[in-house]
Image (cartoon, helix red, strand yellow):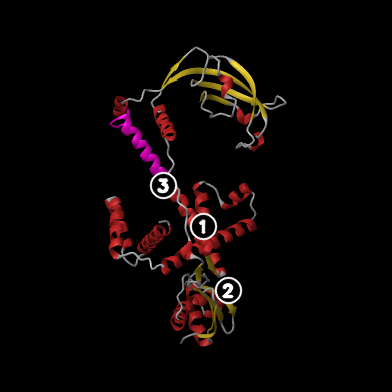
Amino acid sequence: MAASTSKIEREKNGRIECTVTFTAEQTAPAEDRALKALAAEVKMPGFRPGQAPREMLMEKIDKDRLLEETIRSLLPPAVEALVKEHEIKPIASPKVSLKKRDPLTISVVFLEHPHVTVKGANKIKVEKKGPKVDDKDVEKMVQYILQKHEHATETDRPARKKDRVTLDFWGADAEGKEIPPIRTQGHSVTIGSSTLIPGFEEHLKGLKKGEEKSFTVTFPAKYHAKELENKPVTFHVTVKKVEEVTLPELTDAFVKEHLHGESVEAFRKDIRTSMVTQEERIERQRREQVLLEEIRKATNVDLPQELIDDEEESLVENLAEELKRQNMSIQEWMEKTKKKPDDVHKEMQDGAKKRLTLRLGIRELITSKNIAVSDEEMKQTIDEILASAPPAERKNIEPSYQKGQQAYDQLEWQKKVEKLFEQLLA
């Protein structure tokens, strides 16, 4: 006997709420099944598990839990009937809540794809910037590579520009008190490299091994340690070693022997090509990020709260997994970042809305532009994936890439998004 639907409400945002009432005749057998399942967990003297009289079991079993199990028993056929009768196309698991105990009445909320529009879809364009790699950039990279083959010789002469100095140092504030985080031992720096704060390296010129020197340098206005910004600090240094550093001469012979190239000219050309490729990759990533933001801003959709809550739950799970890899719990993270539960909830809700809006906007564009992936394209991509996997793993993952499986659907979606990007970024 089917349940009766007393009311169904459809909203423009894809939310469908069905109010379902079950008769006593429908509820009784479901309650018996629930009671039998729960009875197996109840231990009563003189009876085997699940064999005690109904009246005695009813006194022992929690009424709310029995009701929950009863609804769970009634739900599958009721949901199936609702979906079929009202031609509902759910995109998530239905949300169920109790409205009334007698007669048993529940609310079943389905979520369909909400109506989505992307304003000015054909006008979304992202400026493309060409790679900027000049001779100076190439020369810097050449010098960086040559430094990997540098030769250092310890010397007793005074340190000068381009020498590498190894030193111990500590710093004191304006009142002469040591600043503990600054104390460092065995630090190596090349004079003129500008790796330390401005002015520090200049004071190392002229110092020999074993010599000490004190000097005051003011930290930059913008520094990673806020407490040191714009603060004068007196450094006390002891030179442990001075090394003269020489770089190898860039010749065809050196390139062939150490850099696996044919000549200096070919080596410089390869560097330029590599740098241009890197610039183009970075520019592509930049344009993709701008495009995603443009799509999100152009997307207009009324999101049902249940869908936002589901997405928030997914974000929280992702955060928990990320923190777990850092050996940290969400509670510890909140304490460290001084975030309150309400703050985290608001951030997650905002993030969920943005992710959903973007995802639905992309879906709408893919649909409106009739972007599709052929079976042949899918086969080629899947063959490439399987070919790159180890033989043992290939055998395990191959079934998941059969048509209709989740991995296949995810890959197909990814290929559609790639095609969309190619169109919009052309």
Give the residue at x 44% y 33%.
136
Q: Which residue is mark 2?
A: 64
Q: Earlier in the sequence, mark 3 or mark 1?
A: 3
Mark 2 packing: few (<14 Cα in 10 Å), some, or many (20+)? few
State if disc 2 and disc 1 touch (CB < 8 Å). Answer: no
In space, the residues marked 1 and 2 are separated at their CA atoms by 47 Å
Q: Is residue 415 left or right of residue 200?
A: left
- Residue designated by label 3: 281
> Residue 189 at what x, y percent from top left?
51, 25
Q: Quadrant of residue 102?
A: bottom right
Asked if marks 2 and 3 touch (Cβ < 8 Å), the reply is no
Q: In the rendering, which numbered label is found on residue 293?
A: 1
- Above or below, comparing residue 15 to residue 204 in the picture: below
Asked if the residues shown at circle 3 and circle 1 are in contact, with their CB atoms under 8 angstroms apart, the answer is no
| Amino acid type of the residue tagged 1 in the rendering | Glu
Q: Name the foreground residue: 236 vs 49.
A: 236
Q: Element under label 3? A: helix
Residue 152 lies in the magenta stretch = no
Cα separation, mark 2 vs mark 3, equals: 58 Å
Q: Badge 1 local density, few (<14 within 10 Å), some, or many (20+)?
A: some
- Which span is picked out in magenta? 258-280
